[in-house]
Image: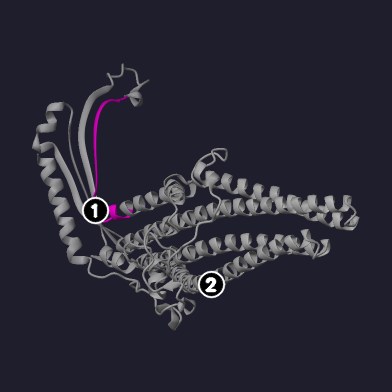
Amino acid sequence: MILKSRLLACATLSATLSATLAACTVGPDFERPATPGAVAEGAFIESADPRFAQAPLPEGWWRLFEDPALDALVTRALERNTSVREASANLRRARALVREARGAQLPSLSASGSATTNQVGTGANAGVGFAPPEPLRFDFYELASDASYEIDLFGGIRRSVEASRGDSLAAQAELDAARVSVAAEVARTYALACSSRLQADIARESLAAQQRTLDLTQRLFTAGRGQRRDVANAELLVAQARAQVPQFEAERRAALFALATLTGDPPGQIDAAANACAMPPRVRVAIPVGDGAALLARRPDVRAAEARLAADTARIGVATAALYPSIRLAGSLSIGGTSPGDLTESNNLGFSLGPLISWSIPIDGTARARVNAASAQADARLAAFDGAVLTALQETEQALARLKAAIEQDAALQTAAAAADEVARITRIRFRSGRDNALQLLEVERNLLAARAASGSAAAARAEAEVAVFRALGGGWENAPAVAEVSATTRD
């Protein structure tokens, strides 16, 4: 009871002195930096198009494709992908380090107990002509407790908590970045698998059409109505069409293997729905893109850069606090005796209490150099933040521009493929009636083959461009606490 009351008094005294003395915090306070460029707060230049909407990007942007197979793949990947799991573990570690840093704001207590048997020898009296006395032997029992508390007079501990909190926010943003990257990569790879199947089917259809033309050309040559050159040209087109099929099939299976790995499965466990997909997903509504301010609040790399800047700004305060003395209250309480019953006697109680002041006097410039190094590191983080902002704006504008081009190209090549198909249909009729020759038919068939292949490639490029826009927008997990708010909380 006595031990407990003395320790409680020590802790109360430490807290009182801390509240009285810890009135200043050295080092700069973090302030959210201004974003470079006036366009950062407004609408995107490329978003002035009816195919884009100024509405906020919704969570789960991949659902805009309205493809249940894609939804299931992304959900599974976010749960099982190895990159997401690694980033999640890093976040748990960072949060544990925050708790460790906060622990320095509290008193440290330790307790110990011992029961020892002691013997004091008498070897110094040996050899003087009489028998030495028996060695002195006794038991000793002791209970002890030590308490110490560092008074954070200059805010070094508080700045350390702020720095670890900034590291934790950066780890959170890196987890969000991993999620964005994985979701986008799953969508892109799924679209690749679907578009490769589409292109393989187009190549098979073209092969079948070319084979029919070859058969017709051979029959006409056999009947004496054609030339061997026409047959050879038809065989050439058949061979070219046949060569495209294994290429697209290989790309399709490679994409399926990649999807399995992205979802945390061995490559051989191919997803059945993805394997059956024959048309790349497409967003049927105007894509919501928001504006620059929303983008910068949402992009994980920008949030991570801001959090790292906040952490390194706090570390300037940690380095500055090292220039000043450190004050620690220390106390110990012990009770001991030669028998267990002595531990209940108040006259066997001993204690010590007092401040410990230590100061590494900065006469060699080392401490000042650490402050300068921390300040330079914060300047580098500021430059990295500005770079992250500009990169985010650049990538978004580029992705929007490329998507507009991909949509227009897809529409134009679909029209071209339809026109080429109609020209080929009419030319075949005219060829059978003898109104067109074999060279004309073969040229038309060659154009049809090229138009269909280009249309399939355009569909694939459009799907990939849509995914690239969502990757650049970086949405889905933007509800993390603001860095400035967290920094203020750690100083309270």
Whether tag 1 and tag 2 are in contact, CB under 8 A, the answer is no
38 above or below 384?
A: below
Identify the element where label 1 is drawn.
Answer: loop
Give how far across and how far down residue 87 sits, in percent: 44, 51
Compared with 147, 405 (above or below) is below
Q: Residue at x 41, y 63 (%)?
A: 475
For residue 203, side relative to residue 229 (left or right) = left
Mark 1 highlights which residue?
Answer: 106
Amino acid bearing label 1: Leu
For this orientation, the residue located farthest to the front is: 433
Quarter occupied by residue 429:
bottom right
Q: For the residue marked with disc 2, what is the amino acid?
A: Lys
Q: CA distance from mark 1 to mark 2?
A: 58 Å
The reply, left or right, for residue 5 in relation to residue 141 is left
In the visual, does 453 lie left or right of 10?
right
Q: Is residue 211 magenta?
A: no
Query: Which residue: 29% across, 69% down?
Result: 25
| Sequence order check, earlier mark of 1 and 2 | 1
The one nearer the camera, 385 or 107, is 385
Percent x, y for residue 272? 51, 41
Please identify the quarter of the rendering in which residue 490 is found.
bottom left
- Residue depicted at 61% across the width and 48% down the height: 252
Regarding residue 102, the answer to whether it shows in the image is yes
How was this image coloured?
one colour
Q: Is residue 361 visible?
A: no
Q: Which residues are magenta?
A: 101-121
Q: Quadrant of the N terminus?
A: top left
Q: Which residue is mark 2?
A: 404
Magenta span has 107?
Answer: yes
Residue 304 pos. (x, y %): 42, 63
